[in-house]
């Protein structure tokens, strides 16, 4: 799969790069990290312009994000409404939406370039929870440009070792996902402990 | 006190604790894996020649002059061929492995000094 995708890119160039980044942002598994490093290497070898590579890559990723958001909005929202109409849980959905509104911006930003494996899920979730499209797009554009820029620069710098660099970065991105999960869950457990201590404390006024 | 608080956890809170432990294990596993992969790549600096690569890409990766590689696979020395190696082999009507072997031999000759570096004496 990886070799085939790269062969298509070597043959057809930027359109393949655009489509693969868009597909990846939609959650379809694509070797995009290696691809962006290869694009960076091609830029270093003078086969492609840096500005063009950055623009096309960012546009591809943003297009995929937008598609994910609208799939969530058109498909996810009615499904949620249907479920709450039949089984209840409106309160819970409202709580989730408030949560998304409060933390969504930071989550979307970091999922674009740092905790990338969760990006496609957040696109769908943002759409289905009716998260503000303007905010989603503004933060998404900045995040995706940063992501593509980082990988292109790494490709430029490590142009003779793209495969090794991609391999290490893929593994490292899972370490970052793991660390984010550890931090989030650790924080939740701390909250549980705090709440249980206030619940256990004697309350003379009750 | 601490134990009493933990004992009062509900089932779903225990599930969060289990997920916490699992994510620590997950992070530890991928950290170890990243370290092992870094060790592997430190000893295998060359990336294997693949069908998707262009001749210029191989020249850059292996630090071999492009004209030498071009000559090895029957292309004009100064050509900047943008076709992937797989397509070049196909256009030349031969298997990719044959072309790959020719490139590898040229790279090995260049590294051993049989082929002089551009503008210099053999090493």
Image (tube, helix red, strand yellow):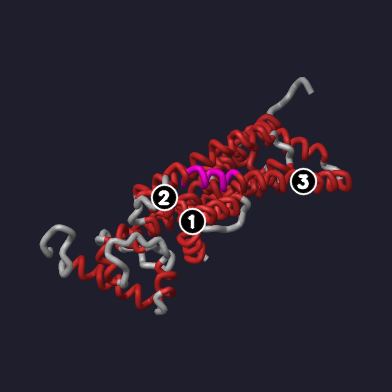
Residue for point 28% across, 71% down: B72
Residue for point 27% across, 65% down: B77
Q: Which residue is mark 3?
A: A74
The image's mark for residue A48 is: 2
Q: Could you tell me residue A31's position as x and y percent?
A: 51, 58
Q: On screen, A190 above or below A17? A: above
Pointer 1 chain: A
Q: Which residues are magenta?
A: A53-62
Q: Earlier in the sequence, mark 3 or mark 1?
A: 1
Along the viewing direction, whichever of A206 and B65 lies nearer the viewer: B65
Q: Total label count?
A: 3
Mark 1 is surrounded, within 10 Å at the Cα level, by few (under 14), some (14 to 19) or many (20 or more) other residues, namely: some
Q: Is residue A38 left or right of residue A203?
A: left
Indicate the quadrant where residue B84 lies: bottom left
What's the distance in space between the residues labelled 1 and 2, CA to CA? 9 Å
Pointer 2 chain: A
Q: Quadrant of the C terminus of chain B?
A: bottom left
Q: Quadrant of the N terminus of chain B?
A: top right
Looking at the image, the residue that sits furthest to the top is: A205
Q: Is residue B17 visible?
A: no
For marks 3 and 2, give the one nearer the viewer. 2
Q: Earlier in the sequence, mark 3 or mark 2?
A: 2
Q: Is residue A26 left or right of residue A30?
A: right
The image's mark for residue A13 is: 1
Is there a contact, CB below 8 Å, between mark 1 and mark 2? yes
């Amino acid at each position: 799969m990886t070799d085939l995708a790269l062969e298509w890119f070597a043959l057809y160039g930027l359109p393949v790069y655009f489509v693969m980044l868009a597909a990846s942002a939609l959650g379809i598994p694509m070797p995009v990290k290696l691809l962006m490093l290869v694009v960076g290497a091609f830029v270093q070898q003078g086969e492609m312009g840096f500005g063009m590579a950055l623009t096309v890559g960012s546009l591809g990723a943003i297009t995929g994000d937008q598609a994910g958001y609208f799939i969530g909005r058109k498909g996810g929202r009615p499904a949620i409404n249907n479920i709450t109409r039949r089984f209840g849980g409106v309160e819970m959905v409202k709580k989730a939406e408030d949560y998304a509104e409060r933390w969504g911006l930071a989550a979307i930003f970091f999922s674009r370039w740092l905790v990338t494996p969760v990006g496609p899920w957040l696109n769908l979730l943002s759409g289905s929870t009716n998260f503000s499209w303007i905010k989603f797009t503004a933060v998404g554009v900045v995040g995706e440009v940063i992501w593509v820029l980082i990988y292109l620069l790494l490709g430029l710098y490590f142009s003779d070792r793209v495969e090794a660099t991609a391999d290490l970065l893929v593994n490292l991105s899972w370490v970052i996902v793991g660390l984010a999960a550890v931090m989030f869950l650790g924080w939740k457990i701390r909250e549980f402990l705090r709440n249980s201590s206030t619940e256990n404390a004697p309350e003379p006024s009750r | 006190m601490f134990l009493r608080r933990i004992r009062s956890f509900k089932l779903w809170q225990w599930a969060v604790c289990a997920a916490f432990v699992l994510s620590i294990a997950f992070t530890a596993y991928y950290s170890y894996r990243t370290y092992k992969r870094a060790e592997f790549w430190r000893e295998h600096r060359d990336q294997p020649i693949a069908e998707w690569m262009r001749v210029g890409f191989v020249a850059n990766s292996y630090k071999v002059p492009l004209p030498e590689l071009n000559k090895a696979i029957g292309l004009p020395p100064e050509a900047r061929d943008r076709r992937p190696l797989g397509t070049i082999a196909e256009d030349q009507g031969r298997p990719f492995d044959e072309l790959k072997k020719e490139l590898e031999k040229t790279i090995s000759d260049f590294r051993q000094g049989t082929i002089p570096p551009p503008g210099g004496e053999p090493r």
